[in-house]
Amino acid sequence: VIKSPRGTRDILPSEWTGWERLLRCAEQVAERAGYQRIETPTFEFASLFRHATGEHTDVNREMYVFTDRGGDELTLRPEGTAPVFRAYSEHGMRVLPQPVKLYYLGSMFRYERPQSGRSREHHQFGCEAIGSEDPLLDASMIDLQRRFYASSGITATTIHINSIGDSACRPGYVRELVAYLHRNADRLCGDCRERIERNPLRVLDCKNPACQSVLNEAPKSLDYLCDECREHWERVSAGLRALEIRVEVDARLVRGLDYYTRTVWEFHPPGVQGSQSVLGGGGRYDALAAAIGAPEVPGVGFSTGLERVLLNLPARPETSVAATDVYVAHLGDEAALQALRLAHILLESQLRVQMTFGSRSLKTQLRYAGAAGAALAVLIGEDEIRDGVVTVRDLRTRDQRRVDLAGATREIITQLHQRGSNAP
Ligand code: HAM
């Protein structure tokens, strides 16, 4: 038997209620703040992410890259920021009032080792504001992300925040960091030692207990900020204070993507530690434009894995019933055709209708009708066919009445209205 590929999963009807709630919540939170929906393609040129997220990053190594029949090197998108930024440049959104505020909901793909909260296809909600350097936008972005969690039911998140500087001050900081890491290399794990030259900032991310004391004492980017970056950082902090948002300054927070400059942050759920527990993260990416060869534009945004949000929500009773007004039951070949026609007519009248497919006993069909949550059942048997009528049965009171086929739709709508349904 063929199963779904490792690291992917089906969202079953019983889970869909929860998903739908979350999607609505994301749309509302984003749209109330003036963000507009954007959908970018599921695949892009691989070079977009190579340049945007960086050559030596996990995200780049984990990409699903393939060559299509035309010889183009494409990839399933591993994240949403680079594509949204590409769309901003490609469609001349610079001429719009800035910042342009966009949000997205969709699948992302990373070839990771699957575990709880980490899969090879995951779903993200993300917001990006492109075209403004205002540090208060960073603060308002953090507030937007916080509001999404709060309105989806996760309060008491912890926000970790840091500034990693920009192209003016980061090289100086990285030099100091690399020198420090080399001096202490014998107290670091193999992974860390390997990363010192390739991606020194990521060394700070290491979770290996043996490395913690060295990394906790490492030089901090905040101590190396240039004047502009320091001013930016202080204004972001002032914005967060004005919003009464408490944050934890985390000198070791660097995030895994090369496009970030200045502010970076992550949200942790209440009571959990470790990187897999991160609900979502974001930051400023003023260097992204240059990385992909576009004219310079600043931007800031966040995204969050929806699976991780669902993992942190209290379990809710599962509901898997598609709401139904009328269930059409039938006995006999001719009755089945009549049922097919009647279900069609009722559906055309905007009712929610189901019928039986295959032959089942009347008892079974009524059980299906009950399970579907229908208020009314329509019964069509040989007698009904002979007399040109249908039997309409109230599934709660079990009252039933025969009505002319021609008047059946009107009768059904009337009966539904009497039961307080909002049928048309
Ligand atoms: P990221 O931290 O790579 O950032 O991913 C954002 C979120 O996506 C994570 O915090 C997590 O919730 C979820 N996520 C990532 N990988 C997986 C996975 N394998 N399985 C389940 N969930 C996952 C970005 O992608 C940036 N584009 C965020 C951003 C937007 N920065 C600025 N704007």
Image (tube, rainbow, N blue to C red):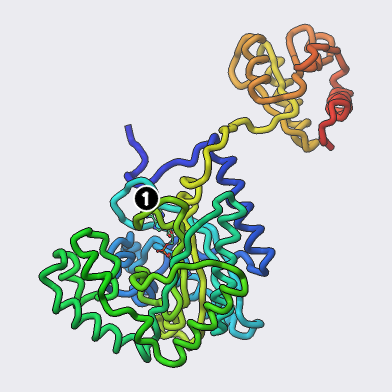
User: Which quarter of the figure is the C terminus placed in?
Assistant: top right
Q: Which residue is drawn at 34% across and 55% down?
A: 274
Q: Does the residue labelled 1 lie within 8 Å of ligand 1?
A: yes
Q: Is residue 69 left or right of residue 339?
A: left
- Label 1 environment density (alpha carbons within 10 Å; few <14, some 14–19, many ≥20): many
Decide which of 230, 80 is in the foreground and name it: 230
- Residue 360 in view (yes/no): yes
The amino acid at mark 1 is Ser
Please give the name of the residue rendered at 75% of the width and 28% of the height, measured from the top-left corner. Answer: 325
Q: Nearer the viewer, residue 423 or 266?
A: 266
Q: Farthest residue to the left: give it.
A: 186
Where disc 1 sits, the SS reads loop
Q: Does residue 326 sit above or below 331 in this rendering?
A: below
Question: Most extreme residue toward the top, as rendered?
Answer: 383
Q: On the picture, is 419 further left or further right than 325?
A: right
Where residue 402 appears, as percent x and y from the top left, is: 85, 13
Q: In the image shown, does 233 or 110 lie closer to the viewer?
A: 233
**Residue 293 sits in which quadrant?**
bottom left
Quadrant location of ligand 1?
A: bottom left
Does the image show residue 107?
no
Counting from the top left corner in percent of width and height, residue 357 is at: 61, 21
Q: Residue at x 76, y 25 (%)?
A: 342
The residue located at (56%, 41%) in the rendering is: 16
Of residue 130 and residue 341, the one placed in the foreground of this image is 130
59 lies left or right of 389: left
Q: Name the residue under label 1.
A: 119
In this view, 380 is above or below 12: above
Residue 419 location, quadrant: top right
Position of residue 228 relative to residue 17, above or below, is below
